[in-house]
Protein backbone atom coordinates (compact mmCIF):
# COMPACT_ATOMS: atom_id res chain seq x y z
CA UNK A 1 0.00 0.00 0.00
CA UNK A 2 1.13 3.54 -0.70
CA UNK A 3 2.55 4.94 2.54
CA UNK A 4 2.38 8.54 1.28
CA UNK A 5 -1.00 9.43 2.72
CA UNK A 6 -2.09 11.88 5.36
CA UNK A 7 -3.80 10.93 8.59
CA UNK A 8 -7.28 12.28 9.41
CA UNK A 9 -6.32 14.52 12.32
CA UNK A 10 -8.08 17.45 13.95
CA UNK A 11 -5.70 20.38 14.36
CA UNK A 12 -7.61 21.52 17.45
CA UNK A 13 -6.37 18.44 19.33
CA UNK A 14 -3.48 18.84 21.76
CA UNK A 15 -0.10 17.29 20.97
CA UNK A 16 -0.86 14.48 23.43
CA UNK A 17 -4.23 13.82 21.80
CA UNK A 18 -2.66 13.73 18.33
CA UNK A 19 -0.04 11.30 19.64
CA UNK A 20 -2.79 9.02 21.02
CA UNK A 21 -4.69 9.01 17.72
CA UNK A 22 -1.50 8.41 15.71
CA UNK A 23 -0.51 5.55 18.01
CA UNK A 24 -3.86 3.86 17.37
CA UNK A 25 -3.68 4.42 13.60
CA UNK A 26 -0.12 3.03 13.60
CA UNK A 27 -1.31 -0.07 15.47
CA UNK A 28 -4.04 -0.57 12.85
CA UNK A 29 -1.36 -0.30 10.16
CA UNK A 30 0.75 -2.89 11.99
CA UNK A 31 -2.25 -5.25 12.12
CA UNK A 32 -2.47 -5.13 8.33
CA UNK A 33 1.22 -4.90 7.40
CA UNK A 34 2.67 -7.39 9.88
CA UNK A 35 1.16 -8.11 13.29
CA UNK A 36 0.37 -6.34 16.54
CA UNK A 37 -0.46 -7.61 20.01
CA UNK A 38 -4.23 -7.63 20.52
CA UNK A 39 -3.84 -6.04 23.97
CA UNK A 40 -1.64 -3.27 22.52
CA UNK A 41 -4.21 -2.49 19.83
CA UNK A 42 -7.08 -2.46 22.34
CA UNK A 43 -5.10 -0.25 24.75
CA UNK A 44 -4.37 2.28 22.00
CA UNK A 45 -8.06 2.12 20.98
CA UNK A 46 -9.09 3.11 24.53
CA UNK A 47 -6.75 6.13 24.35
CA UNK A 48 -8.15 6.96 20.90
CA UNK A 49 -11.70 6.83 22.31
CA UNK A 50 -10.67 9.27 25.07
CA UNK A 51 -9.81 11.75 22.31
CA UNK A 52 -12.69 10.81 19.99
CA UNK A 53 -15.61 9.75 22.22
CA UNK A 54 -18.26 10.33 19.53
CA UNK A 55 -19.19 7.23 17.52
CA UNK A 56 -20.02 9.42 14.52
CA UNK A 57 -16.59 11.09 14.66
CA UNK A 58 -14.90 7.69 15.05
CA UNK A 59 -16.73 6.43 11.95
CA UNK A 60 -15.78 9.55 9.98
CA UNK A 61 -12.10 9.14 10.90
CA UNK A 62 -12.36 5.44 10.09
CA UNK A 63 -13.83 6.14 6.64
CA UNK A 64 -11.21 8.78 5.86
CA UNK A 65 -8.37 6.54 7.04
CA UNK A 66 -9.66 3.55 5.08
CA UNK A 67 -10.07 5.67 1.95
CA UNK A 68 -6.41 6.69 1.96
CA UNK A 69 -4.81 3.56 3.44
CA UNK A 70 -7.16 0.68 2.68
CA UNK A 71 -7.11 -0.32 6.37
CA UNK A 72 -10.30 -0.63 8.41
CA UNK A 73 -10.26 0.61 12.02
CA UNK A 74 -13.41 -1.38 12.69
CA UNK A 75 -12.05 -4.68 11.35
CA UNK A 76 -8.80 -4.31 13.30
CA UNK A 77 -10.58 -3.56 16.59
CA UNK A 78 -13.10 -6.38 16.05
CA UNK A 79 -10.28 -8.85 15.36
CA UNK A 80 -8.46 -7.76 18.53
CA UNK A 81 -11.64 -7.96 20.62
CA UNK A 82 -12.32 -11.42 19.23
CA UNK A 83 -9.05 -12.82 20.43
CA UNK A 84 -8.07 -10.54 23.35
CA UNK A 85 -4.68 -12.29 23.60
CA UNK A 86 -2.07 -13.07 21.02
CA UNK A 87 -1.22 -11.26 17.81
CA UNK A 88 -3.57 -9.65 15.31
CA UNK A 89 -2.57 -10.02 11.68
CA UNK A 90 -5.00 -8.94 8.98
CA UNK A 91 -2.51 -8.93 6.11
CA UNK A 92 -3.82 -9.99 2.76
Image (cartoon, rainbow, N blue to C red):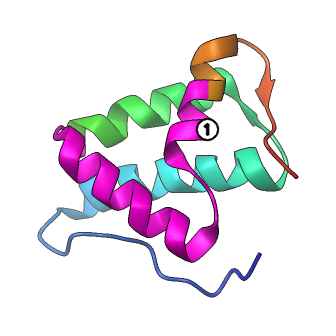
- 34 left or right of 11 in image: right
Above-or-below relation of 76 to 73? above
- 68 left or right of 87 in image: left
Q: Which residues are magenta?
A: 51-78
Residue 84 visible in this rendered orientation of the protein:
no
- Decide which of 43, 55 is in the foreground and name it: 55
**Residue 57 location, x and y as percent?**
21, 52
Above-or-below relation of 29 to 75? below
Q: Quadrant of residue 83?
A: top right
- Decide which of 2, 85 is in the foreground and name it: 2
- Decide which of 76, 40 is in the foreground and name it: 76
**Residue 74 location, x and y as percent?**
50, 39
Q: Quadrant of residue 1?
A: bottom right
Q: Which residue is mark 1?
A: 76
At 44% from the left edge and 73% from the top edge, which residue is drawn?
A: 7
- 69 left or right of 30 in image: left
At 63% from the left edge and 87% from the top edge, which residue is drawn?
A: 4
The question of residue 66 being in magenta is answered with yes
- The residue furthest bottom is 4
Amino acid sequence: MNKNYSYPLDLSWSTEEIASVLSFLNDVEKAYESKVAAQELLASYVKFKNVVPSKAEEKRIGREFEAVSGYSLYQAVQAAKGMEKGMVSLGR
